Amino acid sequence: MTNLLRRSTVRLPLLLLSTLLTVVGLATFWEFELEAYVMYWLGLPYDGDFEDGERLRFILTSSSFSLIAMIVPSIVLKRMVSNTQKIYHRLLRLQHQTEQLANFDPLSGLTNRRVFMDTLRKQLAQQEPAAVLLIDLDHFKAVNDEHGHSVGDETLIEAARRLQDIADQYEGTAVRLGGDEFCLLFLEQKGHSELSRIAHKTIAFLSGPMPELPMSARLGATIGVARSWVDSQDPSVLLQYADTAMYRGKNSGRSTFNFYDSEYEQERLAQQDLELALRRAVDREEIVPFYQPIVALPSQTVVGYEILARWIKADGTTGMPADFIPILERLGLIPDMTRSLVKQACQAASLWDDTLHLSLNVSAAMITDELFPDRLLDQLREERYPFDRFEVEITEEALVGNLEAAQRNLSKLHAYGIVVALDDFGIGYSGLYHLTRLSIDKIKIDRSFFEANNLEHLPMVEAILGMARSLKMKVTAEGIEEFHLPHLPGWLAQSGCHYAQGYLYGKPQAAGDVPTRDRVLLPSSDP
Ligand code: C2E
Ligand code: CA
Ligand code: CA
C-alpha cells in the first residue's frame, strides 16, 4: 500500500508530461494529416490552404488548454494522494501501538503474561521443552512504601532491563507477569547446572545497586524453577510448580532459587494436612489427657498422676506427644492444648480419691509467659481444684531461654502452693545453678539413669539423692519397669528417693481406666 502511494506521487508529473506530449502529438497529427481525411470522409467542406503558422497556433492553443485543464485535477489528485498517505501512516502507527499493548507490558516493555502463556501453551502442545524461572523481587513492597510509586516504577523498569539482558544472553524471553513478578522462559532443554547458573546470575543481577534507590536499599530476587520435561507438560501446572518452588525460597530466607521437587512438595502438603488436622484436634478437644501413676516409696501406693497428652484420632489410632507436641509448639497452640488438658484432667480428678495430685508438663514458651501463672491459677479456681494438689513439671531447657521470667513465674506458682518439679533431671544442662536459684520443690531423675543393664549410673543416682536431701527437695525416679524388680524400688526407698514412676506401676492410661472413689479398676495399658 505505501509503495503504491509513493509510486503514484512520483509518477504524477510523468503522467502530466506524457499526456501533454500525447495532446501535442495528436493535435499535430490532426492538423497536418488527419483533419483533411476526416473532413473528406465525413463529406464536409474543407479548406486545406491553412498556413503552417495557423496550424501551429491551433496546436499550441489546444495543447495549452489541455495543460491548464489537467493542472487542477492533478493538484487535487496530489492532495488526495498525500492525505491518503497521511491517514495510512497514522493507521500503521495505531496498529503498531495496538500490537504493543496486546503483546508487551506497557511499563517494562517486556513480553506480557498473555503472550507468555500462549507461547508456553503452543510449545508444550507440540511436545517441545520449556523451562520457566519464576522471579519474585524481594523487598519491593518496602521500596514502594518508603520511596513512592514512581521510584517503584523506575525500579521495575530497571529490573526488567536487567532481566532482558539475561534473556538475550541465554536466548530466552523475559516476561513481566504482573506486579513485581517476572519470568524467564527458555524454549529448549537446558541442563540443571545451566539453569542453576542462570538463576544464580539473575539473583546477583537483581541484587546489585539500583540507580533509583539509596545504597542502603537493595532489592533481591527469589526464584522457582520448573521444567516441562521433568515436572509437567501442562502450562498452568508448570507455572504453578514454579510458583511453589519460588515460595519455598521465600519461606526459607529469600534471595535463593529452588527447583520444583515433587517429593518435597508431597511432604509439605502432608505436613500442611497434619497441621490443619492438629488445629482441629485442639479445637475439638481430641487431644486428651492420659494419666500415669506416680507412687510413694517405700509403700508403692499411688499418690498422683502425671498428665500425658494423647491425640485420639478419628481413625481410632492414638498420636504420641513426640509426633505432635513439636508441631503444636511451632503453631503456638501449646497454651490452648494445655488449657484443654487441665480442664479435662480437673474434671476427671474430681471423681478420684481427693488426696491424689495432678502433674502437668509445662513447655518453655508457657513457663516464660508473664500471663501463665495467673491463667493457670484462675483456671484451677474455676475448676475448684486445690492448688496444693497440683504440680508443674518443667525441663531445664525450658528455663535457659528467659531465666528471669521463669524465675518470677515459678516463684508465684510456688507461693500459691503449687509444687514445681524439674523434669528429666540429669540429662541436658543439669546445672546446680537452676536448682538453687529457682523455686524448685522436686526433681524427677530422668529414666535414662535406670536403663536396663546400666547399673553404673546408680552411684550418680545416689549423688543426686544426696544433693536433693541437702537442698530439701523431693525426688521422683522415672522409668521404673518390671525388669528392675526385685531390688530397685527397695534400693531407691533406702537411698531416700520419695517417689517412683514407670511401667512397673502403670502405663499412661485413659481417664476411664483410672480408679475412681467408687470404683477400683485394674489399670490397663497404653496403646
Ligand atoms: P516426660 O514428661 O518425661 O514424660 C514421661 C514419658 O516417659 C512419657 O512418654 C511416658 O509414657 C514415658 N514413660 C513413663 N514410664 C516409662 C517407663 O517405665 N519406660 C519407658 N520407656 N517410658 C516411660 P510420652 O507420654 O510419650 O511423653 C513424652 C514427652 O512428651 C513427655 O516426657 C513430655 O516432655 C512431653 N509431653 C507429654 N505430654 C505433654 C503435655 O501435655 N505438655 C507438654 N508440654 N509436653 C508433654
Ligand atoms: Ca514430665
Ligand atoms: Ca520426664
Image (spheres, rainbow, N blue to C red):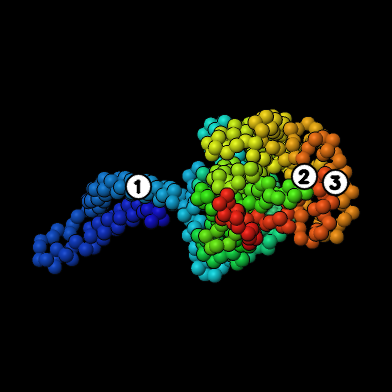
Label 1 vs label 3, nearer the camera: 3
Residue 69 on image: x %, y %: 24, 48
Disc 3 residue type? Ser
C-alpha separation, residue under disc 3 versus residue under disc 2: 9 Å
Residue 300 on image: x %, y %: 73, 51
**Residue 193, quarter of the rendered image:** bottom right
Q: Residues within 10 Å of mark 3 (few under 14, many from 20)?
A: some
Residue 458 numbered tag:
none
| Residue displayed at 78% across by 52% down | 447
Disc 2 residue type? His
* Tag 1 residue: 87
* Tag 3 residue: 495
Q: Residues within 10 Å of mark 1 (few under 14, many from 20)?
A: few
Q: Is residue 354 visible?
A: yes
Q: In front: 342, or 381?
A: 381
Disc 1 residue type? Ile
| Residue displayed at 66% across by 46% down | 304
Residue 413 on image: x %, y %: 66, 33
